[in-house]
C-alpha cells in the first residue's frame, strides 16, 4: 500500500479526470493533464478568441518568467540558467552548436537512446569528423561503469539520461560527470523520463546542459520543453535569432532599434514564440502541482507501487532489472516467451489497461495518481492475457 496518507493520495487523484474504468500506467509515454492545467489552457484560448485585445505586452514576458522560475525551483537551479524551448531536439542542437568539435573527437551515447538524443550527434559527426560511439547496454545494468569504460582522452561530449527510457535503469551521473571533468568533456543530460518523478539537483551534478520535455512525468502540454545551460555556456550562440530574446524587447515601441545584446542569462537560447499563450499557463499549473506535492514525496509513493509490480511481475516470470539498478519509478519487463511486447500492450489496451512496449520490454510507469488498486488490476489482467497467450505457444 502507499506510504502517503490516504487523504493526500485521494486529493492528488482528484486533480485529474481519471476514470476507475481505466488503468493508466503510462506516464513515461504521456502524462494526463491536471484539471487546473486544462482549465488554464481553456481560459487562455477563450481569451484569445473573445478578448484578444486584452493581451498586454507584459503577457509576452511575465508568464514565461513564472514558468522559468518553476522549472528552476524543481531543478534547484537559477531562473537565469533556464531556457524555454519547443523540444528536446532543439535543446540538444543548441548544445551541439556551442561545443566545438574537431576530427577525431569522440561523442558517447548509450545504446538504443531516444532518437532526439542521437540524430543531432550523428549530424555533428558527419560534419566535423568526430566519432560517434554507442555504448552497448550493460548486462550487469551498470550504465555508469559502461559509459566511463568507453571514455578516452579524445572524449569531447557524453550524452546520458538520468535513467534508460525503456526500463528505468539508473545512470550514476555523479560518477559520469567526474570522469567527464577528468577528460574535460562536456555532459548533456536528458531528464525527460525522470523530471517530475525523481528528484534532480543540478548543483550536485553540475552538467553542462540539461534538457527535458514537458508532457510526460511533468504533466504539461506537448510543445514546450526546457533547457538548462550552465554558467560557463551562458555567453554562447543561440540556435536562432528572434526578437523576444534581445535586450529591451519588452518595449514594443522601440523594437526597430535593433540590439546586439541579449536578454539576461539563458533567455538568449529561448525558442521563437516561446510565450505560447495557451501552453505556458498549462505547463505552469502542472509544475506547480508537482511542487505542491513535492517530487521526493511523488518518488516515494511511486516506489511503493513499483515494489508491488516487481513482485507480481517476477511471479509471472518476467525478467526485470534489480531494484538497486533502477530509479524506482518505472519498470521494463521482458519475458523469454514473448518476443513481441507491442502485441501484448495492444491486448492490454483492449481491457483499458495502458502501458507501452519499448524494444523488447513492456514499460510500466505509474505516477502519483495511481494506487494499489490500479496495480492489482494490471497484474490480474496481465496474468489473464499470459495464460491465454503464452499457454497457446
Image: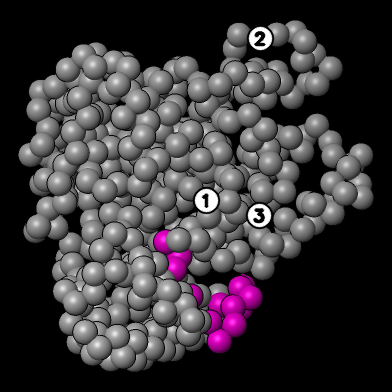
Q: In the drawing, does residue 14 fall left or right of residue 43?
A: left
Q: Which residue is mark 1?
A: 214
Tell me if mark 3 has few (under 14), some (14-19) or many (20+) residues whose alpha carbon lies within 10 angstroms of its own: many
Q: CA distance from mark 2 to mark 1?
A: 31 Å
Q: Is residue 21 magenta?
A: yes
Q: Secondary structure at mark 2?
A: loop
- 295 lies above or below 2: above
Instruction: Identify the element where label 1 is drawn.
Output: loop
Q: Which region of the structure is painted magenta?
A: 13-28
- Secondary structure at badge 3 equals helix
Indicate which disc, 1 or 3, sits on the residue closer to the N terminus: 1
Whether pointer 2 and pointer 3 mark residues with C-beta atoms closer than 8 Å, the reply is no
- The percent position of residue 94, horizontal first and vertical second, equals 44, 27
Q: Quadrant of residue 366?
A: bottom left
The image shows residue 147 at horizontal and vertical percentages of: 15, 41
Residue 353 sits above or below residue 163 on the image = below
Identified at 39% across, 67% down, the residue is 356
Q: CA distance from mark 2 to mark 3?
A: 32 Å
| Residue in the image at 77% along x and 34% along y | 58
Task: Write down the quadrant of residue 126 in the picture.
Answer: top left
- Checking the image for residue 282, the label placed there is 3
Number of numbered discs present? 3
- The circle drawn on residue 259 is 2
Amino acid at each position: 500500500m502507499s506510504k502517503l496518507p490516504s487523504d493526500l493520495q485521494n486529493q492528488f487523484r482528484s486533480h485529474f479526470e481519471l476514470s476507475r474504468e481505466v488503468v493508466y500506467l503510462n506516464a513515461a509515454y504521456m502524462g494526463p493533464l491536471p484539471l487546473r492545467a486544462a482549465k488554464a489552457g481553456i481560459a487562455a484560448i477563450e481569451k484569445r478568441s473573445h478578448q484578444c485585445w486584452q493581451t498586454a505586452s507584459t503577457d509576452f514576458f511575465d508568464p514565461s518568467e513564472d514558468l522559468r522560475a518553476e522549472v528552476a525551483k524543481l531543478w534547484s537551479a537559477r531562473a537565469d540558467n533556464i531556457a524555454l524551448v519547443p523540444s528536446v531536439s532543439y535543446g540538444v542542437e543548441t548544445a551541439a552548436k556551442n561545443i566545438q568539435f574537431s576530427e577525431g573527437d569522440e561523442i558517447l551515447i548509450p545504446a538504443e537512446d531516444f532518437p532526439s538524443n542521437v540524430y543531432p550527434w550523428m549530424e555533428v559527426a558527419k560534419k566535423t569528423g568526430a566519432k560517434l560511439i554507442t555504448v552497448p547496454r550493460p548486462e550487469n545494468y551498470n550504465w555508469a561503469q559502461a559509459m566511463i569504460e568507453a571514455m578516452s582522452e579524445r572524449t569531447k561530449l557524453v550524452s546520458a539520461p538520468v535513467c534508460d527510457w525503456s526500463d528505468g535503469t539508473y545512470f550514476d551521473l555523479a560518477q559520469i560527470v567526474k570522469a567527464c571533468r577528468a577528460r574535460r568533456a562536456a555532459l548533456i543530460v536528458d531528464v525527460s523520463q525522470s523530471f517530475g518523478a525523481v528528484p534532480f539537483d543540478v548543483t550536485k551534478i553540475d552538467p553542462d546542459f540539461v534538457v527535458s520535455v514537458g508532457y510526460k512525468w511533468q504533466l504539461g502540454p506537448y510543445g514546450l520543453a526546457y533547457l538548462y545551460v550552465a554558467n560557463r555556456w551562458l555567453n554562447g550562440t543561440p540556435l536562432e535569432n528572434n526578437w523576444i530574446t534581445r535586450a529591451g524587447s519588452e518595449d514594443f515601441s522601440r523594437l526597430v532599434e535593433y540590439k546586439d545584446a541579449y536578454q539576461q542569462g539563458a533567455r538568449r537560447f529561448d525558442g521563437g514564440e516561446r510565450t505560447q499563450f495557451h501552453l505556458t499557463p498549462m505547463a505552469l499549473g502542472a509544475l506547480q502541482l508537482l511542487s505542491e506535492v513535492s517530487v521526493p514525496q511523488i518518488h516515494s509513493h511511486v516506489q511503493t507501487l513499483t515494489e508491488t509490480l516487481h513482485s507480481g511481475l517476477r511471479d509471472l516470470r518476467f525478467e526485470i532489472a534489480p531494484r538497486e539498478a533502477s530509479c524506482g519509478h518505472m519498470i521494463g519487463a521482458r519475458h523469454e516467451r514473448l518476443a513481441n511486447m507491442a502485441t501484448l500492450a495492444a491486448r492490454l489496451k483492449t481491457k483499458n489497461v495502458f502501458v507501452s512496449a519499448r524494444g523488447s520490454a513492456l514499460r510500466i510507469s505509474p505516477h502519483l495518481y495511481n494506487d494499489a488498486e490500479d496495480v492489482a488490476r494490471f497484474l490480474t489482467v496481465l496474468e489473464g492475457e499470459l495464460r491465454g497467450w503464452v499457454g497457446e505457444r
